[in-house]
Image: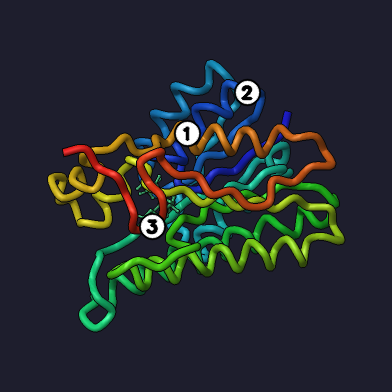
Amino acid sequence: MRTVLITGATSGIGEATAQLLARNHFRLILCGRRQDRLHRLQAELKQHTEVITLVFDVRDKKKIDEAITSLPADWKTIDVLINNAGNAHGLAPVQGGDVEDWDAMIDINVKGLLYVSRHIIPGMVERQRGHIINIGSIAGKEVYPNGNIYCASKFAVDALTQGMRLDLNPSGIKVTAIHPGLVETEFSLVRFKGDAERAKSVYRGLEPLHGEDVADLILFALTRPDHVVVADLVVLPRAQASATVVKRQA
Ligand code: NDP
Ligand code: 8X3
């Protein structure tokens, strides 16, 4: 049974992935900052598989180090890393952006992904085996107005995924990126700092993707034959044609 570490497992895509993988013969290390949610999920999923939880902020190198070092010996072999933790913070023109929002997006979406990966990749290299799945975004393929720093952070995820695939090729480690379009999760609530009405309006008049739709592709990537790598996947709701072209019903 493969051991999977999921960052950002407390909601949205990460939680849906935990739900699906628990039912498909993976054992799980669930990570996030909200301990209560992690414990609730662990209690729910332990009827399906073994689950442990790690509480850390991906910005905090020391806490990541402590958390991963604290894993019991039989959990130290991490076969699959799902770099999912991340969010957009704000939606503003570059000339008026909030510098704290910029820091959050770069520190979480880019540096956080790197810090966690730096801990886990050496073990994969040693074993000459492993699979990394990075959650990018349509925002990492196309820039949209006011998306600036969030888009840049997701372009960075795309570049880092390609870099990982090149550097880890000699070690036989699979590297996958999945780039979703609009997924209704807590994403917009975080982007708009708790403004539920504004968050809801992002998905008004269309059926967005659900966390489960992305989880399904993660499971697909993880269950291909050993010689097959799903390298790069873009997934959109039917109503979405690009980062900016979306068909909405009145
Ligand atoms: P959610 O807001 O529902 O989930 C975000 C997750 O990331 C939470 O579990 C949160 O956990 C975790 N997280 C955020 N900041 C930190 C941090 N500093 N340290 C540790 N964990 C953190 O959004 P989604 O599920 O939609 O987002 C998941 C990924 O998917 C993100 O990378 C996002 O950019 C990407 N994505 C989302 C799309 C969408 O439309 N929703 C589309 C394309 C990509 P906690 O708060 O408990 O720490
Ligand atoms: C999330 C999708 O289009 O809101 O990455 O940036 S979008």
Is the CB of mark 3 within 8 Å of ligand 2? yes
Q: Is residue 237 above or below residue 41?
A: below
- Callouts 1 and 3 close, C-beta under 8 Å: no
1 or 2: tag closer to the N-terminus: 2
Q: Nearer the viewer, mark 1 or mark 3?
A: 3
Q: Is residue 206 above or below residue 201?
A: above
Task: State the CA–CA distance, disc 1 to disc 3.
Answer: 18 Å
Residue shown at the point (75%, 59%) measured from the top left: 122
Where's residue 117, x and y in %?
62, 59
Task: State the CA–CA distance, disc 1 to disc 2.
Answer: 15 Å
Other residues around mark 2 within 10 Å, as few (<14) / some (14–19) / many (≥20): some
Is the CB of mark 1 within 8 Å of ligand 1? no
1 or 3: tag closer to the N-terminus: 1
**Amino acid type assigned to the residue bearing label 1 in the image:** Asp
Residue shown at the point (40%, 40%) measured from the top left: 237
- Name the image quarter holding the C terminus: top left
2 or 3: tag closer to the N-terminus: 2
Residue shown at the point (63%, 44%) measured from the top left: 71
Circle 3 sits on which residue? 243
- Secondary element under disc 2, as helix, strand or loop, is loop
Where's residue 84, x and y in %?
50, 50
- Secondary element under disc 3, as helix, strand or loop, is loop
Circle 1 sits on which residue? 213
Left or right: residue 89 versus residue 10 is left
Rendered image: mark on residue 24: 2
